Image (cartoon, grey):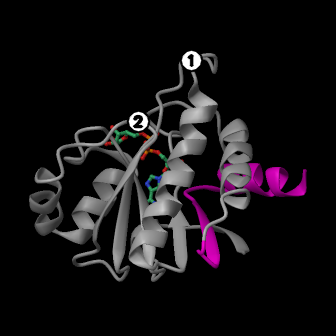
Amino acid sequence: MDLEVVVGDITVLETDAIVNAANSSLLGGGGVDGAIHRAAGPELLRHCRRLGGCEVGRAKVTPGFALATTWIIHTVGPVWRGGHDGEPELLASCYRASLTCADEVGARTVAFPAISTGVYGYPIGEAAVVALDAVTSSGTDVQAVTFVCFDDANRRAYRAALGS
Ligand code: AR6
């Protein structure tokens, strides 16, 4: 599997699927979730209303609507509560569940944001290690994974995790 780390806006990528760091309502919010809903257009929210929400650590897929991507995979990361409340397992589950969704729809290229590291407070250094471990051990048919960082500090965390 090819792994790539880029700095930028996930909403403009042309991968088969992009992953959204959503909340359990799947009805939109701030951060990358807000950006994806704004860029995909109102049809996304109409579609999401029918999905019945999503549990932490799981994922559901929708079309990309106005985005260049074919699919949006919505996953719900854990809120960071200090790291002893199952956060690493739940975060790893987000990555694995997202790749399972990608396999189900036949997506071969997938872009992930740094799930849980914004509003949900997961430390980026630890999150990057979990993300890389979960993706590389997943057994998915996805051929290329792009980790999309919003800033250079996040990119450095992924580079460090890749090096270790
Ligand atoms: N492209 C790539 N990364 C982005 C973008 C973007 N356009 N915008 C933000 N990020 P967050 P969470 C980065 O807060 O922590 C929402 O309200 C951001 O810098 O979006 O999982 C949901 O509805 C950070 O590194 O997601 C939930 O309520 C990363 O994406 C809650 O936030 C994740 O930050 C989920 O919190």
Residue 92, placed above or below residue 81: below
Q: Quadrant of residue 142?
A: bottom right
| Element type at mark 2 | loop
Which residue is under mark 1? 85
Q: Residues within 10 Å of mark 2 (few under 14, many from 20)?
A: some
Under mark 1, the amino acid is Asp
Secondary structure under badge 1? loop
Compared to 82, does 143 lie above or below? below
Residue furthest to the right in view is 164
Q: Is residue 121 left or right of residue 28?
A: right
The picture quadrant where one finds residue 82 is: top right
162 in magenta: yes
Q: Closer to the camera, 63 or 141? A: 141
Magenta residues span 141-164
Is 29 magenta? The answer is no
Residue at 70% x, 71% y: name it: 4
- Residue under the image location 49 percent in, 53 percent down: 97
Position of 19 with respect to 155 (left or right) is: left
Residue at screen point 69% across, 47% down: 128
Residue 56's disc number: 2
